[in-house]
Image (cartoon, grey):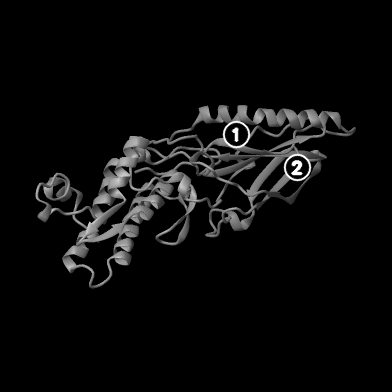
Amino acid sequence: MKVNHGRHRAAAVMVAAAIAIAAMTATQTAQAGTDNEPPVVLLSPAAWIQNTVPVYVPIGQGFDLKYQLKDDSGESRLTFVLYSGGTMVRTVGPMELVPANGSTQSWHMDPVAPTSAETSGPFSVCAIAVDASGKASAPSPQESKACTWLALEVPIAPVANGCGGQQWGPTLGKLQSSVLNAQSFGGVRVVFKSACDAHDAGYSGVTARDPVADRVFNYRTLSREWIDNQLFWDMATLCQQQLKPGMVTANQYKLCDPGVSLKRYLSGVGWGAVDLDTYVPPGAHVYYEAVRKYARKAYDTDSTIPGVQYDESVPVTVPPAGGRNGT
């Protein structure tokens, strides 16, 4: 199991400024009384956006965070830090002094507006508390109880590039997409791009709507094997939707769903075919086998480090459950 100490140090540097500002504000308004211990904060999302509940924060909506804050002085200031894939994208606070008696309280966060892959998640949030005398809670995200994951739905476009391989770079990826986004079966064009876009979102680990299945998935919680299987079923669905009965023969339909094997396609009936009359287009099974065989390193196994990280083992992360199974 891999623990990312480097990420811990980097995150500590990113939140240091927030702690310093809160502490400076606190010392300016320090109150007399007993205050021997630093505050302790426990953060959790509201029940309707927890990962175990299949309901997510829709695109463009704000959300509530629930927290428990305790300090022997009876009050503290909070700062919330929002991360996208391990990159700090928003800091809220420090707020005015709030009760720190251990009761459950709520704080409303404004909507997230993803504009790129780097700001599209997966999202986590950490809370830092500083009491009136300037004592700070354990620096997040080292203190995992002060951090939690958020299932915030984002548009699929910033994290998708169609059926091209992202691991091959943008130029080759675009060229691949121009060839692989659609195929012709019996003279009827079937567009596979939406299935590939959902697969891209799955590999990145964001929360997004699969446009083919018409369901929102929190992909951070799903394995590479599950996401690859879903690609096959999405492509089979697109074959069914676009090749209506009577449009092609039964044999022509089978070339789309399930399609020939990757081995047969590469043997000369598809890739490298010299006789267009016997050419076999790649169907659902070719795409599925291709990603299983060649796309392993495009799958992000660690949602807490910026960029795509691939590890054979499931990384141990803070917050917990940021590592994914890439086999």
Left or right, 72 with respect to 200, comes to right
Q: Position of residue 141 (x, y in %)?
A: 60, 36
Q: CA distance from mark 2 to mark 1?
A: 18 Å
Q: Position of residue 318 (x, y in %)?
A: 55, 38
Q: Residues within 10 Å of mark 1 (few under 14, many from 20)?
A: some
The residue nearer to you, when weighing 110 against 292, is: 110
Who's the residue at 25% across and 72% down the image? 245
Residue 176 image-quadrant placement: top left
Check disc 1 and report its element: helix, strand or loop. Answer: loop
The residue nearer to you, when weighing 16 against 199, is: 199
Whether residue 135 is visible, yes or no, is no
Q: Residue furthest bottom?
A: 246
The residue nearer to you, when weighing 140 against 212, is: 212
Who's the residue at 24% across and 59% down the image? 256
The image quadrant where one finds the C terminus is: top left
Check disc 2 and report its element: helix, strand or loop. Answer: strand
Figure check: 227 above or below 143: below
Callout 1 amino acid: Gln
Q: Position of residue 253 (x, y in %)?
A: 21, 64
Who's the residue at 49% across and 34% down the image? 306
Callout 2 amino acid: Lys
Whether residue 268 is visible, yes or no, is yes
Q: Which residue is mark 1?
A: 142
Figure check: 296 above or below 4: below
Q: Which residue is mark 2?
A: 70
Q: Are marks 2 and 1 in contact (CB under 8 Å)?
A: no
Residue 148 image-quadrant placement: top right
Q: Please report whichever mark, 2 or 1, sits nearer to the chain's N-terminal start.
A: 2
Q: Position of residue 213 (x, y in %)?
A: 41, 61
Left or right, 283 with respect to 217, comes to left
Left or right, 96 with respect to 206, comes to right
The residue nearer to you, when weighing 270 against 311, is: 270
